[in-house]
Amino acid sequence: MIAFIDDHREAHGVEPICEVLPIAPSTYRAHAATRRDSRDGLGEGARDAVLREKSGASSTTISRFIGVRKVWRQLLREGESVARCTVERLMRPWVCKASCAASRLERR
């Protein structure tokens, strides 16, 4: 169905075609955006890998003990445009492990 809309949207437009077919225009646009992102090569997964490398979030040493805010500010200083919540999402597995390890040390 998506391929049919792609073939005929120049002549008729997306909305008139979607009125006839059982697909919403927003669904078509969501699929088109997904294809566009995968062709760019920097979909969410690829961008996450680049950000993990730059932030050091995957390293096993010091990044476990640096907070999200410090890593986010460092990325901004390096010219990387990234949201703080994205850095938080990428660091979540390591931050949890670090805080759990720190709490075990405090109890002793």
Image (spheres, grey):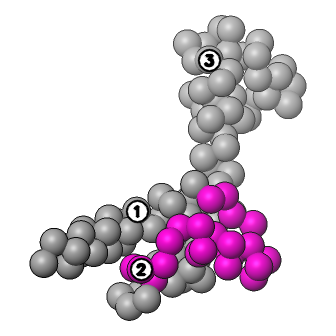
Q: Residues within 10 Å of mark 2 (few under 14, many from 20)?
A: some
- The amino acid on which the numbered mark 1 sits, given as a three-letter code, is Arg
| Magenta span includes 80 | yes
Residue 81 on image: x %, y %: 75, 66
- Which residue carries the number 1 mark? 92
Instruction: Please name whichever residue, 71 or 14, is drawn nearer the observer in this view of the structure.
Output: 71
**Which residue lies at the image location 24% right of the left edge and 69% below the top edge?**
103
Relative to residue 76, is residue 88 drawn left or right?
left
Determine the residue located farthest toward the right in the rendered image.
Answer: 11
- The amino acid on which the numbered mark 3 sits, given as a three-letter code, is Ala
The magenta span reads: 63-84
Instruction: Please name whichever residue, 96 or 43, is drawn nearer the observer in this view of the structure.
Output: 96
Q: CA distance from mark 2 to mark 3?
A: 47 Å
- The amino acid on which the numbered mark 2 sits, given as a three-letter code, is Phe
- Which residue carries the number 3 mark? 24
- Which residue carries the number 2 mark? 65
- Local SS, label 1: helix
Residue 100 on image: x %, y %: 24, 68
Q: Which mark is residue 101?
A: none
| Magenta span includes 90 | no
Do residues under tags 2 and 1 come within 8 Å of each other at their CB atoms? no
**Does the rendering let one see residue 36?**
yes
Q: Which badge, 2 or 3, comes first in the chain's sequence?
A: 3
